[in-house]
Amino acid sequence: MIKYIPILALLFFALACKEQKISAPSDRETMVMVLRDMMIIESQVSMQKEEVRDSVKMELQSALKAEYNWTESDLDQFAAYLSQHPEESLELHDEVRLEVKELEKEL
């Protein structure tokens, strides 16, 4: 029995250290809208003077969180979800790009 303790300990540590799967923070439609708004925020921030970028970004992100009733933790989970699911991340980004192109046509 004692000879199995190291094997059980290694198995326990291997399972404990296994990367945790992150679930989607919301439905697909909401994730597309949040991603779209995040991209718009980045675009707006990039056009600001360097000395006000941080405050503008914080203000816009606060508005984003309020709009979708998300917390900072939800945004972090969304970013982690996108990094853990690269195929879906690409699909969401493609949807946002198509939406932006459609909006540009209307202008």
Image (cartoon, grey):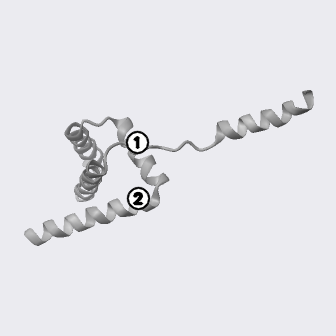
Give the mark, 1 or 2, whose residue is nearer the N terminus: 1
Residue 36 vs residue 74: left or right?
Answer: left
Write down the residue under mark 1.
76
Q: Nearer the viewer, residue 89 or 5?
A: 5
Residue at coordinates 27% horizontally, 46% vertically from top-left? 57
Residue at the far bottom in the pictured view:
105
Q: Secondary structure at mark 1?
A: helix
Residue 32 vs residue 6: left or right?
Answer: left
- Estimate the x, y position of residue 61 in percent, counting from the top left: 26, 43
Q: Quadrant of the N terminus?
A: top right
**Which amino acid type corresponds to the residue marked 2 in the rendered image?**
Glu
- Numbered label attached to residue 54: none
Residue 30 vs residue 13: left or right?
Answer: left
Q: Nearer the viewer, residue 91 or 51?
A: 91
Residue at coordinates 47% horizontally, 43% vertically from top-left? 22
Write down the residue under mark 2.
88
Mark-to-mark CA distance, 1 and 2: 17 Å
- Estimate the x, y position of residue 42 in percent, counting from the top left: 28, 55
Q: Secondary structure at mark 2?
A: helix
Q: Quadrant of the C terminus?
A: bottom left
Local crowd at mark 2 within 10 Å, few (<14), some, or many (≥20)? some
Q: Nearer the viewer, residue 71 or 91?
A: 91
Q: Is residue 4 above or below residue 56?
A: above
**Which amino acid type corresponds to the residue marked 1 in the rendered image?**
Asp
Residue at coordinates 16% horizontally, 68% vertically from top-left? 102
